[in-house]
Image (cartoon, rainbow, N blue to C red):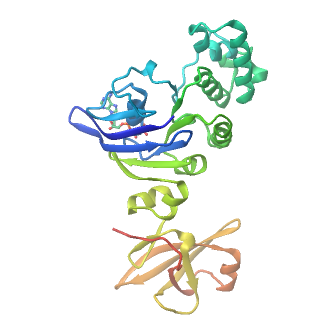
Amino acid sequence: MAIEIREVNKSFGEAAVLRDVSVDVTSGSLTALLGPSGGGKSTLLRVIAGLERPDSGQVLISGRDATRLPPQRRGVGFVFQHYAAFKHMTVFDNVAFGLKIRKRPKDEIRRKVEELLELVHLDRFAARYPAQLSGGQRQRMALARALAVEPEVLLLDEPFGALDAQVRKELRTWLRRLHDEVHVTTVFVTHDQEEAIEVADTIVVLADGVVQQAGAPGDIYDNPASPFVMRFLGPVTEIGGRLLRPHDVEVSTEPGPDTTPAVITRVVRLGFEIRVEFKVRETGEERQAWAQLTRESVERIRAESGTEIHVRPALSAATVPAS
Ligand SMILES: Nc1ncnc2c1ncn2[C@@H]1O[C@H](COP(=O)(O)OP(=O)(O)OP(=O)(O)O)[C@@H](O)[C@H]1O
C-alpha cells in the first residue's frame, strides 16, 4: 500500500515542525525517516498514523485521501520505542489481543499467533510474561502484535532505540529479513545513519522540518545533495575546499595534477582499514584532514608520522563544496 505525503505543514504554537514536506513511500517498501533529534521525524510518522492532523497538506494512503481519517480507519500498525506490553498477559495473549477484540474465531487466532511467534522467533516463549523477556524479545513481541491484525502499513518509531548496540544490530538484520518475508509497507524512524543504510530501501533525510534528500541509501551516500546530508550519512574530510569521504582521498608520495601537499601527523590502525591523519597547507592556512587507506597503500607510501605526501580527491569521488 503506497503512502503519499503532499506538502504537509505542521506547527506547534509558533514552531514550524514540518515545512512543505512531500514524501512518496512505495508500496511494499521499507523506508527510513532519518535525521537529527527534533527534526520532525516522529511528528511526520504521527501524521501518517493519524495521531496528528497537519495544518495543511494531504496524506494519501493507497491513492485515497486519508488526511481526515481517524487512526483506526487507516489500516496502520504502530510500534513505539517504549513499547507498553500488557504485563498481566502472556506473550501469546499480547499478540492475540488485536485479533480477540476483532472477535476472530478462536482457531484462527491460535493459528495466526503461532505463525507470528514463529516468524519473530518467539515460539518457545508463548507462555511467558513480558517481564520474563529480554528487551530485544519484547520488541519482537511488539512487532508480532502489530503484524497480527494484518496492517497494510507498519509504522515504527525508533523501534530499537532503547536497546544496547549489539541487540540493535541483531534486530535490524532481523527486521530486514522479516520485511523480505512479509512485504508490508514499512516506515521507521531512526537517528542512526548506519541503521537506515543497512535496513532501508529508501531513506528520507529530515532536518529542521524539511526533507533534505530522499533516495536509495547508496545514492544518498554517494551523491549527497548538501554538506549537511554528506556529514549526516557518514564520515567526511575536507580537501581543497570540498567535502569528500575519507576513503575517496588519493594519497601519493609524488605531486600530480590537482594534488595538495600534506604532512602525516598520525597513523591509526583499525584492522584492515587504516586512518591516516595529515596536515594540509592551503591558501596559507594549515588544516587537519584524514584518509582511510588500505594496508597495501599505507605500505606503498611508507606512511608514518612526518611523511610528506600529496593528496587529492579520487577521480570517482563524489564531493560537495565545504560551505
Ligand atoms: N505535541 C507537541 N507540542 C509541542 N511541540 C512538539 C510536540 N511534538 C513535538 N514537538 C516539537 O516538535 C519538534 C520536532 O519533534 P519530533 O519529535 O517530530 O522530532 P524527531 O525528529 O522525531 O526528534 P527525536 O529524534 O528527538 O524524537 C521538536 O522541537 C519538539 O519539541
Which residue is most to the front?
63
Q: Residue at x 50, y 44 (%)?
A: 32
When asked about the image quadrant of residue 243, the answer is: bottom left
The x, y position of residue 77, in whole percent, is 52, 25
The x, y position of residue 205, in whole percent, is 43, 49
When asked about the image quadrant of residue 70, the answer is: top left
Front residue (pair 156, 68):
68
Front residue (pair 240, 62):
62
Which residue is most to the left?
14
The x, y position of residue 235, in whole percent, is 51, 62
Image quarter in which the C terminus is found: bottom left
The x, y position of residue 256, in whole percent, is 51, 92
* 239 horizontally vs 105: left or right: left
- 62 in relation to 123, above or below: below
Front residue (pair 209, 269):
209
- 307 in relation to 134, above or below: below
